[in-house]
Amino acid sequence: MTHLERPGKPTLLVALCAIACAACTTSGTPSASSPGTPSSSAVPSSAPQPASAPPSDPTVFPTAAEAPATSVPQAPLPPGYPKVVKVSSLPGQVRNWFQMQGTTRAVQLAPGVWTALQDGAAVEDAVNAEVLDGFCSSIKAFERVYRGGRTYPGACW
């Protein structure tokens, strides 16, 4: 008997796919309707819907008049930091890491902890970039003491 002579399996497969697709597209709330009855979210309604804001376009940045009136908070740092340093003055592993990325200046956030200072960026931008590079134990201590235990991406040695 070939697969064409067994109509039950393809029908079952199509039904399972339809159920899986329906489960992925529902709103996530359980429906009290029977399996053969479409849920209320699938039935078009002729009742007027309340006006909603248009979806925001992530590629459009707000103008100065639309931007929130909040400032970017300065991340807490140890006394005497941040320091802008030349990448050429850093320890070998860290220096090589930054040089491979084409970075010539870095911001030292604490002893043994740096972040890249990209061309055109302010020190505050680098401090708030949340990427930490340096010595693993120094980064862990910095995250524990100055970042409430939150871990950040970056490279460590």
Image (tube, rainbow, N blue to C red):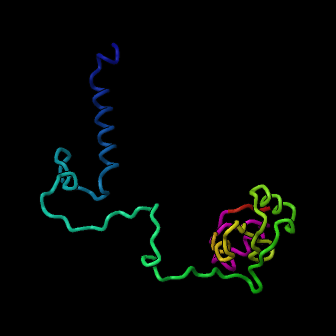
Vertically, is 128 above or below 1?
A: below
| Residue shown at the point (73%, 61%) measured from the top left | 155
Q: Residue at x 47, y 67 (%)?
A: 61
Q: Is 138 or 124 nearer to us in this picture?
A: 124
x, y (%) of residue 32? 20, 56
Q: Nearer the viewer, residue 31 or 151?
A: 151
What residue occupies the far bottom of the structure in this picture? 79
Q: Number of marks in the image?
A: 0
Q: Quadrant of the C terminus?
A: bottom right
Residue 100 drawn at (x, y percent): 78, 55
Give me the residue at 47% from left, 83% from top.
69
The residue located at (27%, 67%) in the rendering is 52
Q: Which residues are magenta?
A: 130-153
Q: Quadrant of the N terminus?
A: top left
Q: Position of residue 19 (x, y in %)?
A: 30, 42
Question: Dividing the picture into quarters, in which one does residue 72 lie?
Answer: bottom right
Answer with left or right where residue 50 lies relative to residue 88: left
* Left or right: 114 as drawn, with respect to 19: right
Q: Position of residue 95 (x, y in %)?
A: 83, 62
> Residue extending furthest top?
1
**40 is higher (above) or lower (below) than 8:** below
> Can residue 26 be found in the magenta stretch?
no
Horizontal side, residue 140 vs residue 32: left or right:
right
Q: In the figure, 15 relative to 65: above or below? A: above
